[in-house]
Amino acid sequence: MDLADFMSKGLVVKPPAEFISPSVDYDLLLGRVIETEVYKEDVDVGLKVEHLHRGVMVAGGSQDERNATNLKIIFEASKFSWNYLMVDTRNQLRKLVKLNPETRVYPSKSICINPLDPEDSSISEYIPLLLQLFQILWNLTDRQSICLSEALRSVYEKYENATPTLEDLRNALITQSSSKLRSPQERSEIEGVIRGITELLVSEESPTINGRSTMPFGDLTTNPTIIEITSKDRHFSSFLKGLMIIKALATDTKRYSIFIDDAEEIFKNIRFGWKTQQVYFQEHLTGWVESLKGMKVGLHISTSLPRLIYDPVRPLIETQIFHKLVSSEDIDAAGDLLGLEEHAPGIHSNKRERLYQKTYLKYLKEGEALFHRPDLPTGFPIKIHYLTPVSSMPPSDQEIKIRLQELYPPQNINLTESLPSTMLERDLKNESEHAAEILQLLHEYPQLSSTNIVLSLKIEVEPEKIRYLLEKLKELEYIKERLEIWKSKTKRVYSLTLKGEQALKEYNESKH
């Protein structure tokens, strides 16, 4: 080693820490071991592909440092066809485009993921997952959980041949809260859930979750995929990040990872004084992580401070990379995970009584970290070799848009181009055919009662569905209702509006 280089490294004021730095096989190269005794870096170190599904946590240091480390891992994983699905609130992950041309970036509001789409699971399996997400994020009361579960079941039953949306769920809850059978306390609690969902629906980012899914969730995992949202709305970002996890649990796809930055939004730690109910809900998080592992789906989380992550989840994330930490609470949390010793007999000299392994976390420089992977007993210091494009400016929105248009079909990123062609299909979706039959009947026989309409169509359509469609068509102003007096009795009859006539004509023309 060059003497000047040795001296410059030796002058760094660091504690005389001792670590066991093993030579190990790896697939994903991260960097090199830092040999604390002689201040030299000479052993390459990294991860095995089979470690990825067992979880990765990057914590400490600056935001830029964590970004660079996360990008390094994600890019190295892509070399082995291990894809990542990422939620990005800072528009920094799009730098991956310069490293891997197969990376897909969906800018804010350019894609929709319907929270109520059960993907590959059954509705009965999916409802508990959705309920757990709301419970974790909003700390629901027992009554709120029951009402939300009832509302979810009702919207799936109502839209038997279509997938309901978040707005449909909100409407079902409004119907519940307006029931005269509810006590004022019950209505108040249901309205709390309605406010939470309304806040999601009025968010600037609401097109990302309100509507039908642009594509099946599994399709998002076939390439490295980045979904960008703004970081201002934590109510929304925490929901979307949690949604990624339950969608993964509901999808059959394997061999990919979900990346979640600011992971404390989902995996927030519980402090004394929190409600017992919240502690109970947090236990769902450990179940999620263990289930993902069993499915061979990785969870890669990033956070500024390890103490912010729910205690029981930390050891389940089996690969840990800790950059510089300052507070004793964070250092203790990291030290426990890494298997570090502070006061113990020396490794290289039995004259020492202190290893300074935890203290060493305070003195890590930019790009340095303590690293631990599942097949090793303790952590050790490494210097991460960052990628050149990581320090460059990310591609602009225009560059991303042009690139996506060149590489992928427009319908994958442009919601309006994939919408049905007629007004009736856009408004009624999978029910448009039956709705058109009702409009056609009223076109030929104006002023029909609901009973007459049911009798005319009941062979083809169930009576309850006809009554539901009549209410929906009236709400959308395709038909109007009025009272008609006949033989001293009144009955409600329906007729087409001008809008209904136009919609029927447009629909019929599109079918010929």
Image (cartoon, rainbow, N blue to C red):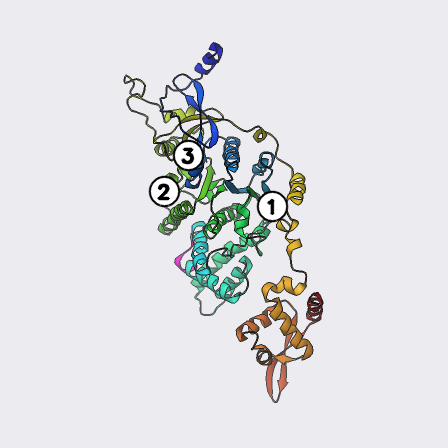
Q: Earlier in the sequence, mark 2 or mark 1?
A: 1
Q: Which mark is residue 108?
A: 1
Task: Look at the image and tell me whether residue 326 can be seen.
Answer: no
- Is 399 on the left or on the right of 69, as rendered? right
Q: Nearer the viewer, residue 231 or 160?
A: 160
Which residue is farthest top?
A: 3
- Write down the quadrant of residue 88 in the picture: top right
Q: Which residues are magenta?
A: 140-144
Taking the spot 65% from the left edge, 76% from the top edge, the residue there is 441
Foreground mark, 3 or 2?
3
Residue located beneath label 2 in the image: 312
Image location (x, y in percent) of residue 33: 43, 24
Q: Amino acid at mark 1?
A: Ser
Q: Earlier in the sequence, mark 3 or mark 1?
A: 1
Please rate how many residues cluster around mark 2, counting C-alpha atoms within 10 Å: few if below 14, some from 14 to 19, many from 20: some
Left or right of 154, for residue 508: right
- Alpha carbons under labels 2 and 1: distance apart: 33 Å
Numbered disc 2: secondary structure: loop
Earlier sequence position, callout 3 versus callout 2: 2
